[in-house]
Image (cartoon, rainbow, N blue to C red):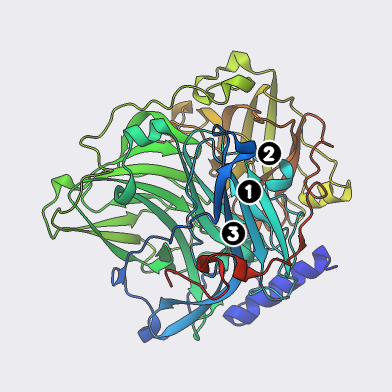
Amino acid sequence: MTTRREILQLGAVGAVGAMGALGMARMSDPVPTPSLLAPANMPVPYRGVFRRPPELVPYATGFDDGDPARPFAKFALTQRLAQAQLLPGLSTTLAGYNGVFPGPTIRVRQGTRSEIRIRNALPAAGLLHPAAFNTVTHLHGSASLPQYDGYANDFTAPGKVKNYQYPNWQSARTLWYHDHNHLVTSQNVYSGLAGFYPMSDQYEQAQLPQGEFDVPLMISDAMFNADGSLGFNDNGHAGLWGDVIMVNGVPWPTMKVKPRIYRFRVLVASITRSYRPTLSTGDPFYVVGTDGGMTPRVEAVQSWRQGTAERYEILIDFRKYRVGQMIEMRNLSNKNNVSYANTNKIMRFQVVADSGSTAGSISAIPATLDDGGSANPERGGLDVMKLTPDMAVAKRILRVQRQGGEWTINGETWEDVAASGFSRCFGSPQPYSIEQWTITNESGGWFHPVHIHLIDAKIIARNTNGGKPFPWEGGPKDVFYAGENESITMLMQFNTGAHIGGRYMVHCHNLVHEDHDMMIQFSVGDWRNNDPISSDYPVVDTTPMGSYPPAYQPGFAPGT
């Protein structure tokens, strides 16, 4: 078994090998490492054609025990290497779900239980590290059982398969699935293991654009070696900032849009970089959704700050523009990023003549939204946006710091958790209890997007912005952007749905920080419930792939 020290050494060797003899950057001084591409192979902003990720269809549907009130859908994904055309004149090897990046979009409806068979068909060694190419799949934003939540040490080795079970009882939201394997999450996600998982319900479908006017945008950045392969340099475990910005795997694409109102599900899947999108016209975005679903009030903003793993759903009204007009989505960036010539650009929109059906469109920007006002009420759940401080039965503080050469939370790391036999917990709230947590960034000179698994939370205070949440934070959140010297206070209910809890992770979603080793855990109820490692082991894959439809075969790669 590879030790932590070996993984750290391998990571350092891999970084130098990928990008040249850069030397190890000081933690306080990231070294800009642009791509080593020849000018002819460097993508030019806005020449690429926008594309949506392919959508996955279930290979089986039905009803649990024949009950029409309990529908299910079964999907299958194969993690494998494939070639992608990201750059002019060169191919790039990626690790993707079904061999594509982003992975296939999985759309589900609230109340439909899903089962996703995830097969690890990757080679023995990692694409960007020589350690074993183990994988762990986390459905980010889902209130899953611990054994299906993507616990960092619940890995699936090459040649094995795991059937992940998801309840999908939560309100409509933009979830996403990605790798979460301990110590190499950053390399595995950066290699391509990420995809969308939008969940709908009757309230969201009635109020927001659907179909062709409901568009996922996965924003990421990368650096490349001269031969087109991915480069990797984590700047002494500080982070990775690439010089090529991609949207859905296309560098700086141009998207053709009709003069309608579009909804964009914006996900930052960079492993470190944060963004501040703005429109070249100076017109506003309308924020209609956050990590955990719709916002009660629609906010018009000129820009917003978004870190890794945060999701914001925004509307853009293209009706005001003339046919042929070009509108750029630019990046104003934030503190603690590394900028290059074109990292101030994200994508471009080109308005084209209206045509076709109006199905899925809306006629006006709404002022308010109604999500139905409940969160699993039959099991004691409350609407998170209606929580108040007097409901909290406990208050806890999470201090994110840099100590002894490691990123820590409250002075602890995941190594401390592992040394305890995975029993060490930051806290043990009871199922359905309400607590108040405060995240404080005491690391100095860095920002941290902190992700709390299982929960949705209402931000009630920031020590910046006059003590109030930012205007774009008016909905339920599960990732909390802690800028330099910032603190964020939130309320959350530990709503476990139909199960009785167990252990869940808290970590920085700068995935380099998570790997080194900024992650702890809490338990809901007894920490021994639903052991996340032993409750449902991956098994050797013996199912013939030929028994599945063509989309699940190893050679099938739509969208590449």
Q: Which marked residue is nearer to the observer: mark 3 or mark 1?
A: 3
Res. 60 in view: yes
- The location of residue 406, given as percent across then percent down, is 73, 55
Q: Residue at x 52, y 52 (%)?
A: 308
Q: Position of residue 448 (x, y in %)?
A: 58, 47
C-alpha separation, residue under disc 2 versus residue under disc 3: 39 Å
Does residue 209 sit above or below 186 in this rendering? above
Q: Is residue 108 left or right of residue 367?
A: right
**Label 1 to label 2, Cα distance in Å?**
11 Å
- Pick whichever of labels 3 and 1 is earlier in the sequence: 3
Residue 172 x, y percent position in the rendering = 47, 36
- What's the amino acid at mark 3? Ala
Q: For mark 2, does the 10 Å Cα neighbourhood hold few (<14), some (14 to 19), or many (20 or more) residues? A: some
Kindly identify which residue carries mark 2: 399
Seen as rendered, the residue at the extreme left is 322
- Classify residue 48 by image quadrant: bottom left
Q: CA distance from mark 3 to mark 1?
A: 29 Å
Q: Position of residue 486 (x, y in %)?
A: 55, 38
Toward the viewer: 306 or 296?
296
Which element is circle 2 on?
strand
Q: Is residue 520 left or right of residue 511?
A: right
Residue at position x 54%, y 34% in the image? 68
Could you tell me the amino acid type at mark 1?
Cys
> Which residue in the rendered view is the most extreme toward the right?
420
Which of the 4 image quadrants contains residue 13?
bottom right
| Residue assigned mark 3 | 76
- Determine whether label 1 and label 2 are within 8 Å by CB: no
286 on left or right of 168: left
Q: Quadrant of the N terminus?
A: bottom right
**Going 60% across and 50% down the picture, which residue do you hit?**
509
Secondary structure of the residue carrying tag 1 is strand
Please tell me the numbered disc located at residue 217: none
